[in-house]
Amino acid sequence: MAAEEYTVVMDPRLLGEEFPKISSNNKSIMGQCLTEKIWKDLKDHKTKTGEWTLRKAINTGFVNEDSLVGCHAGDLESYTDFAALFDPVIEKYHGGYGPDRKHVTDMDAGKLRGDFAEKSNIKSTRIRVARNLFGFPLNTAGTKESRLAIEDLMKRVFETLTGDLAGTYYSLASLTKEQRQQLVDDHFLFKPGDRFQVASGYHAFWPAGRGIFHNKDKTFLLWLNEGDHIRIISMQQGGDVKAVFERLCRGVKAIEDGIKKITGNAQAFLCTEHLGMITCCPSNLGTGLRGSVHIVLPHLFKTMGLKKLDELARSLGCQVRGTHGEHTEIVDTCDISNFHRIGRPEYELVQNMIDTVNKLNELEAKK
């Protein structure tokens, strides 16, 4: 599709000087936190690096009144310049993570305490992290040139990968028909058009700078400029979560080392002590990690349904999504993953997912 199809259209309520009326149908966290004072104080401010504005930040929550978070950042400075809005949004979404907290990180797969007790009903395991590169605007505020520069840099980084991490990069702008079909068959090909992201500029200049890298075994992947600059993914069939997490930890370090070596920068990724890894959406701050399994739980599917099953999982620190991800129903499998991203190290979030799956399997066995 043409890039212009994903041009940001601002909600009319945000174009004037008056405080925008928030509809009673708006359930977003942004809608709960935005006040007339915040609007008055910040509506004319632009961030130094990306010229991101409050209007641009909250547009997705006004255009999409069913948005959960309802706001996106355009650069690192968004989280400090618009802290009056982002701080309470982060605190509400991440269960009380206040502005005085410091994020902790630990990608040591050897610290996992346990494994899945029952693996026969686990179809696949997938753990990913989101990262944004130091020295570039976030893609919400990025240009065609910044996306192409990121792609050029990452192509050089991919050439440094060795062993089971080595592989091939496919640019979406130059895919052959056969390559595209293979990526579709492998369920690797991502598409533009998510309305929550479109309203914040994620998909501008599509498909420039977008691409997919995967290793020979198709167990280590990177999505380039799909949303955040990179999504680093480790996955495989079955329930060997330790192998998946161990590969991810090695892969993230290899990518980080490659970026530092090529750029000469001491820092590869956008991050701060307070927020951890900086991401466009506040929901992914901190670790940027989602550890998940596709699992079959026929008894719980039948007796509880998606909503109640998700409520149970959330009480354990995780969430349940439908067969095809967010906003889909359970067809044959569901996706169970960690809900929180910040304030706890990566290995603890993966362990939380393991413990939740084991608890649900116990309930399934009691049918």
Image (tube, rainbow, N blue to C red):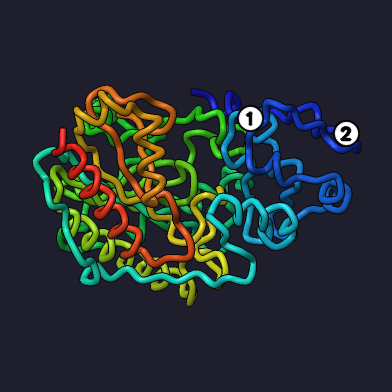
Mark 2 Cα shell of 10 Å, populated few (<14), some (14-19), many (≥20): few
Give the x, y percent position of residue 69. 59, 42
What residue sits 24% from the left and 43% below the top?
360
Q: Residue 181, located in which quarter of the rendered image?
A: top left
Q: Is residue 122 left or right of residue 94?
A: left
55 is higher (above) or lower (below) than 23: below
Where does residue 91 sit, x and y in percent of width and height? 60, 56
Q: Where is mark 2, residue-wise?
A: 16
Circle 1 residue: 7
Query: Element at badge 1?
Result: loop
Q: Is residue 348 left or right of residue 45?
A: left
**Residue 310 occupies quadrant:** top left
Residue 152 in view in this figure: no
Q: Badge 1: how crowded within 10 Å, few (<14), some, or many (20+)?
A: some
Q: Residue at x 70, y 59 (%)?
A: 49
As drawn, is 285 to the left or to the right of 153? right
Disc 2 secondary structure class: loop
Please state which amino acid type lies under the numbered disc 2. Answer: Gly
| Marks 1 and 2, the one that precedes in the sequence | 1
Compute the Cα span from label 1 to label 2: 20 Å
Closest to the observer, 168 or 96: 96
The residue positioned 41% from the left and 34% from the top of the image is 173
